Amino acid sequence: MALATSTAPSGGIWLELRSCESSDNYADATGNGFYGAYQFSASTWRSLGYSGLPSQAPASQQDEAARELEARNGWGQWPQCARALGLS
């Protein structure tokens, strides 16, 4: 049971953030320089210790990276959506 919980995409505010950023599309790669459900830049993704592109990573890895980024730097990493969701 613990394995399923740790690999399942997160809900709550994280779902709201993903929905705002990418319409909850983990494979989002629209050519604007941002990738995945949380619209990471490639350089931010690499700074978190990951390789490849976020849009090619599993949902659980993107969720983990988003939580780490928020813990390090707060909700300001997603300025428009954070404002819209009342997080900043």
Image: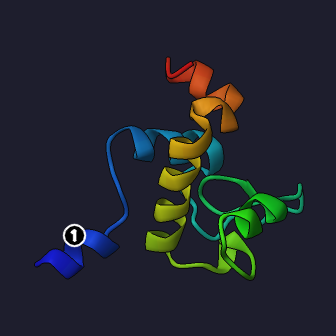
In the rendered view of the protein, which quadrant contains the C terminus? top right
- Mark 1 Cα-neighbour bin, 10 Å: few <14, some 14–19, many ≥20: few
How many marks the image carries: the answer is 1
Q: Is residue 16 left or right of residue 27?
A: left
Query: Residue 27 placed where, x, y %?
Result: 63, 71
- Judging by the rendered image, the residue that carries numbered circle 1 is 5
Q: Nearer the viewer, residue 63 or 81?
A: 63
Residue projecting furthest to the right: 32
| Nearer-the-camera pick, 18 or 23 | 18
Q: Quadrant of residue 65?
A: bottom right
Q: Residue at x 76, y 58 (%)?
A: 44
- For label 1, the SS is helix
| Whether residue 46 is situated above or below residue 57 in the rendered picture | above
* The quadrant where residue 43 appears: bottom right
Front-most of 56 and 68? Answer: 68
Q: Position of residue 37 (x, y in %)?
A: 59, 58
Place residue 49 in its image quadrant.
Answer: bottom right
Residue drawn where x is 54% and y is 66% of the image: 62
Quadrant for the N terminus in the image: bottom left
Q: Give the residue at the far front of this rendering.
A: 72
Colour theme: rainbow
Horizontally, is 71 left or right of 39 in the view? left
Query: Residue shown at 59%/50% (left/top)?
Result: 69
Question: Compared with residue 51, is residue 71 higher up or lower down, i.e. above or below?
Answer: above
The location of residue 23, given as percent across then percent down, is 58, 49
Q: Amino acid at mark 1?
A: Thr
Give the x, y percent position of residue 45: 71, 65
